[in-house]
Amino acid sequence: MTCECGGTLRVKKEVVPFDQAMGLPGVMLYTDVARCPKCHSYEVLIPNIDGLHRAIAREIVRRPARLSPPEVRFLRKVLGWSGRDFAEHMGTSVETVSRWETGATPIGAQADRLLRLMVMTRDPVSDYKRLDLLKTVARAKPAAVRLLVKAGQRGAWTVKKRAA
């Protein structure tokens, strides 16, 4: 590998902070770093960045402590949502999401749990529609569900909505 200055890059494993790119203080990567002995520039090599993000997200949601503002922002980004998308899915305002992410207001316990559940049960990149139902939940008045549930072959059940 050659540097832009013409020097030959030397690659070796190093421990580097991950907080510069994703704002997560305390996360360190042990990965290849290419350094130029001539101009002293360097590049951190990160293979499979989506896999790295998912691994970090899994560890964050497994911790029992309330999510910190940088963790809320990181998890939102892992889910692939803008602040507006995230607010709609969480059933809150864009301003509230901003307050969670800046630390002006801590994320509430229920919102914290919902965010963790979304991260644990969702493929971050390929499935944007499955959780869209959350945008409209609890907006209508409560009403009893009316269903006809029919037994089928081999114990399979079929659910049909009944007219009111």
Image (cartoon, grey):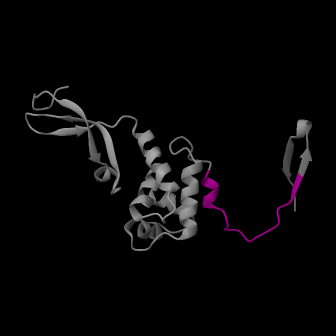
Helix, strand or loop for the magenta stretch, by majority: loop
Residue name at image x 58 percent, y 56 percent: 117
Question: Is 138 located above or below residue 86 in the figure?
Answer: below
Residue name at image x 66 percent, y 68 percent: 139
Q: Is residue 11 left or right of residue 105?
A: left
Residue 161 visible in the shown view: yes
Question: Is 90 located above or below residue 81 in the figure?
Answer: below
Q: Identify the image quadrant of the C terminus.
A: bottom right
In this view, the residue in front, 142 or 5, is 5
Residue name at image x 52 percent, y 62 percent: 64
- Percent across and percent down for residue 87 are 51, 63
In the displayed orientation, state which residue is furthest to the left. Answer: 38
Magenta span has 6?
Answer: no
Q: Is residue 29 left or right of residue 50?
A: left
In the displayed orientation, state which residue is furthest to the bottom. Answer: 105
Q: Is residue 36 left or right of residue 103?
A: left
- Percent across and percent down for residue 47 are 36, 34
Magenta span has 136?
Answer: yes
Span colored in magenta:
131-148
Residue 126: image quadrant is top right
Image label count: 0
Q: Identify the image quadrant of the N terminus.
A: top left
- Percent across and percent down for residue 161 are 84, 54
Residue 80 visible in the shown view: no
Residue name at image x 10 percent, y 29 percent: 7
- Percent across and percent down for residue 14 are 26, 40
Residue 44: image quadrant is top left
